[in-house]
Image (tube, rainbow, N blue to C red):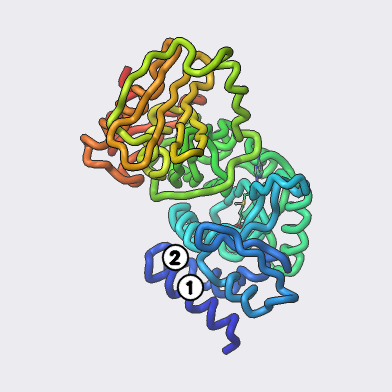
């Protein structure tokens, strides 16, 4: 056995042992090699940073990374070389790909729609399993779509690949039994829900504006989609759902702290934003809040804002402190709202991702704990 085949087998065994890969997907993972979807130069997301790897320089490392359980960035900044360095396309982490396919629960003959083709590994796995004619995948970025199309040409079973906006679904082949998004959303596109059959399943990474993210497994019933989150996730955002924050001056025209009186909190702001789950819970409960942080001089200031541009707050984190200075301004007390949600979550025993769920109904999003009848605090009115 070659070193590559050995690495592939080891990865598949690990994915199966962890429960991410179900036995019905094993053959597809064996026959649709991940390395076939990787460009010669990529950036592997290893140990908190990105490792650049060039196949010509390090062929063994390249193959090792191809069969490591890491996400691999294949495009930055939408292909623009503007030094921003934001990842805009990737081959997702194998654990994530396997567990989302598990959640999708496809059956023979099911027709599947995917939004966010990227280099095409996930769509190729689906086409292998479901048959080429049953799989449609949509990619917004023409350069990424061209890369995927080239990758698909080498396959026996290639999906229908469309260049377009996944927010529109793909009406010509609808309805679908299953839908899967591989870029994250904070609003589930209504058009996508509308193209899934009654009792069909839609799997997607949901990432509130505030932070955190988790995979949602939604069952569709007409214009409603509802279901639990199945686990943590970190995906790049659907491009048009990125948030362009207004300038701070729009909130605070004069000098800080403006009219904001001094208050204190015992909740560390970093315990909220540096905790993927805590940030997710806040984001679910308060979908119109976001934050920015500024680090410097042994102190971190967390700035909180509402998207309606009515209110802001700052909270200063100082290392070793047990009380933190708060300033809040505007009709909403945005830090107090965040703190209330975190205190509620703590009182509930810090429930994990899997205990939360989401109902999307005619454009409205309602998050809940354990069951739809138990909405998160802010949704209680
Ligand atoms: C994480 S990558 C996809 C991973 C891929 N499915 C795989 O097999 O591993 C996310 C992709 O979503 C694409 N994307 C972002 N916004 C989109 C949109 N509105 N419509 C279609 N694709 C979009 C990005 O260009 C990127 O290629």
Quadrant in which the N terminus appears: bottom right
At x 58% / y 46%, what residue is drawn?
Answer: 236
The reply to whether discs 1 and 2 touch (Cβ–Cβ < 8 Å) is yes
Quadrant in which the C terminus appears: top left
Residue 24 x/y as whole percent: 46, 67
At x 38% / y 64%, what residue is drawn?
Answer: 19
Residue 237 x/y as whole percent: 58, 42
Residue 264 x/y as whole percent: 31, 24
First of labels 1, 2 by sequence position: 1
At x 62% / y 42%, what residue is drawn?
Answer: 174
Query: Does dot 2 land on a helix, a strand or a loop?
Result: loop
Q: CA distance from mark 1 to mark 2?
A: 8 Å
Whether ligand 1 has any atom under 8 Å from the Cβ at mark 2 is answered as no
The extreme bottom residue here reads: 1
Residue 163 x/y as whole percent: 74, 46
Q: Mark 2 sits on what residue?
A: 21
Of 322 and 142, the residue lying toward us:
322
Q: Is residue 311 above or below residue 88?
A: above
Of 277 and 138, the residue lying toward us:
277
Q: Is residue 329 above or below residue 241?
A: above
The answer to whether residue 301 of the structure is visible from this angle is yes
Q: Mark 1 sits on what residue?
A: 12
């Amino acid at each position: 056995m070659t070193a590559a085949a050995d690495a592939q087998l080891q990865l598949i065994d690990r994915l199966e042992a962890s429960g991410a890969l179900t036995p019905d997907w094993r053959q597809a993972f064996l026959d649709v090699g991940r390395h076939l979807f990787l460009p010669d130069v990529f950036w592997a997301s290893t140990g908190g940073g990105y490792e650049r790897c060039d196949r010509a320089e390090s062929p063994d490392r390249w193959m090792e990374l191809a069969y490591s359980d890491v996400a691999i960035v294949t495009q930055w900044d939408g292909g623009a070389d503007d030094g921003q360095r934001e990842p805009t396309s990737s081959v997702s982490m194998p654990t994530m790909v396997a567990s989302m396919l598990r959640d999708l629960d496809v059956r023979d003959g099911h027709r599947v729609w995917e939004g966010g083709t990227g280099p095409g590994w996930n769509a190729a796995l689906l086409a292998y399993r479901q048959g080429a004619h049953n799989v449609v995948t949509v990619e917004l970025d023409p350069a990424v779509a061209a890369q995927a199309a080239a990758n698909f040409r080498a396959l026996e079973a290639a999906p229908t690949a469309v260049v377009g906006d996944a927010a529109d679904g793909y009406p010509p082949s609808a309805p679908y039994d299953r839908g899967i998004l591989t870029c994250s959303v904070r609003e589930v596109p209504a058009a996508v829900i509308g193209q899934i059959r009654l009792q069909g399943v839609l799997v997607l990474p949901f990432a509130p504006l505030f932070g955190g993210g988790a995979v949602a497994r939604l069952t569709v019933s007409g214009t409603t989609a509802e279901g639990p989150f199945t686990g943590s996730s970190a995906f790049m955002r659907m491009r048009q759902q990125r948030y362009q924050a207004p300038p701070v001056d729009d909130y605070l025209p004069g000098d800080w702290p403006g009219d904001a009186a001094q208050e204190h909190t015992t909740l560390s702001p970093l315990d909220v934003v540096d905790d993927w789950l805590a940030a997710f819970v806040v984001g679910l409960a308060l979908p119109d809040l976001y934050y920015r942080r500024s680090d410097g001089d042994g102190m971190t200031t967390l700035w909180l804002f509402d998207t309606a541009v009515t209110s802001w707050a700052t909270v200063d984190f100082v290392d070793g402190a047990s009380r933190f200075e708060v300033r809040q301004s505007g009709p909403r007390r945005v830090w107090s709202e965040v703190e209330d949600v975190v205190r509620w979550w703590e009182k509930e025993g810090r429930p994990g991702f899997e205990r939360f769920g989401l109902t999307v109904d005619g454009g409205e999003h309602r998050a809940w704990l354990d069951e739809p009848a138990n909405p998160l605090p802010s949704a209680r009115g």
